[in-house]
Amino acid sequence: MWVIVEEVRKSFAILFAYPVEVVFWIFSPLLWVIPLVFQGKALIGAFSSTPFGALAGTDEFIPYVLIGAIISTYMFSAVWSMGNSFRDETYYGTLEHILSAPVRPVYILVGKGVYNSVLSTLFVIVQLLICVFIFGLEITLAKIFPIFLFLLLLIVGLYGIGFMAAAVTLLIKESHGIIHLFEYVLFLFSPIRYPVEVNPITKTISVFIPLTYALIALRGLLLNIDFNFWKNSVILLGIDCAIIPLGLFIFYKIEKRTKTRGTLADY
Amino acid sequence: MREERQPSRLWRVKDRVFHYLRAINAENIKEWRIELKYKPDFIRQFFEPFVYLFPYFLYGFALLGGRYSEHLRSLTGISDMIAYTFIGYLFIGFLNTACWAMGFSLRKEQWFGTLETIFVAPVPRWVYVAGMALHSTCHQGLIMLIQAVVITTFFAIVLQTSGLFLSLVVVLLMLLGLYGLGIIVAGLTIALKQWWVVSEALATLIVVVTPIAYPLAVLPFVLRKVSMFLPTTYGIIGVRHFLLGEELVVGLPTIILRLSIILVVWLTFGMLVFLIMDRFGRKRGSLSIY
């Protein structure tokens, strides 16, 4: 526990050495929505679309993509930040030090996961507050608990993926491009920007991504779109139960392999 | 005496130019070698543009319930959402060249531990950035060529081949303007260190105000005015006019003139920022600070 707390403290100390990064992560997901708003205006000439409504359950595409952008913060955090966390240690020249410390590497990994979860949640809260006070998004207090429940279920599932991404970095080294690609694949097949029902391939693959169920539930709660609360909760819980042990197992195996082969310090 | 000096000076200038060109090419070759060392990452770069582009297509499909938009036609003269968006995103790929490859170059050398070594080499520092520009233009050009062939074939997009030469002229001017931006980012990296925030923030803002997937007409007044200072605006609308027949909101001579002015201003400003930041970094002793 102490190792995890120290890892979180260290990560925050590094983050605050680059304060401009904090500002960037708060505003960038909101900025990414703007081109979609203009694209919608150019294609439709209005801010609501009947074909979009038939697929998404709401005609208004701006709140739809706005929520998608905010929640995708977790995906970036889990895949990108977790994936690069050990690569960053290589660049800092500290990877060998932390992995040879008298603690199990998995605690360091969990520490990095906790740090990214806390940070992403802080960003999401600020972004939601911006949406409430500037864009007039309404969140009733009764919805706060279910929202946090789905966020928690989402975070756990995504960090299972994050653990795998961190392991891949130990193996491939210069893996930021592959992680970026993986992140975009998740982007493509999750209902972040558009309802996945628009294409049979995206619809099929989205079934395996935890973000799909979380977004359906969170949009349902925030935009009053009908959704099955229990079905989405149980599926997310099931994915979490499978993906966390799998992520940890893959990390353990790859970490052991790199140590055995002596490639840990390779650039 | 004067007659003897002139050929000697000319020879020295010529020698220096060749010296710089060799250094630029050496940087280009070095980058190819490093990239080819990481094969999965190298291959990935040829697939990524497709994954990046499809969400915009799917979003358009979801909004329209099909491929064609009457409203887009009334604004631009083009109703094919796929062709319109594709051309916009194809050429904005060069923004990545400027913001990421050029801006990233110095930070990457710092990570490799070779920044100080490069900075004491007997060439001006802009030569290093020019080498990166050459490499990333070749690399990005290759990626774009593959992307163009695949997407036009898959979606049966018909381009006006008669406008190809003029499109390339416009792209060249846009690219030179973007090099100015790349030099600015590279310079800011020396002082700000966390290069990617600068790159990402600038790229995001430029993507928002450039008419990539939408015409200038849908932008609010202020953003429309801002877009008039960007080479990407003229580059994209120019290329789309030549290849797809988009109706122009500004005349063609105006586009060429403004692009030429922008590239001179951006390149000059970029070099200025780079030199100031370089001097600032060395004076403060922050060059090797992480």
Image (tube, coloured by chain):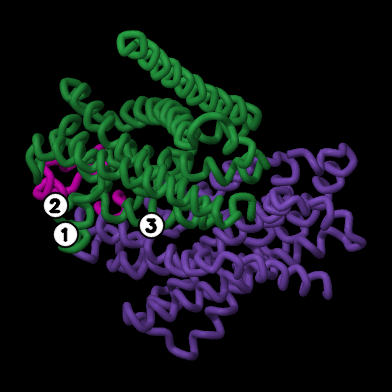
Give how far across and how far down residue B86 sits, in percent.
30, 39
Q: Which residue is mark 2?
A: B71
Secondary element type, mark 1: loop
Q: Earlier in the sequence, mark 3 or mark 1?
A: 1
- Colour in which chain A is shown? purple
Secondary element type, mark 3: loop
- Please provide the residue range marked out in magenta: B60-84
Residue at the image position 49 percent from the left and 48 percent from the top: B278
> Do the residues marked 2 and 3 share a common chain?
no
Secondary element type, mark 2: helix
As drawn, the residue found furthest toward the right would be: A102
Kind of residue indicated by mark 2: His
Q: Residues within 10 Å of mark 3 (few under 14, many from 20)?
A: many
- Is disc 2 in contact with disc 1, using a CB cutoff of under 8 Å? yes
As drawn, the residue found furthest toward the bottom would be: A141
**What predominant SS class does the magenta segment belong to?**
helix
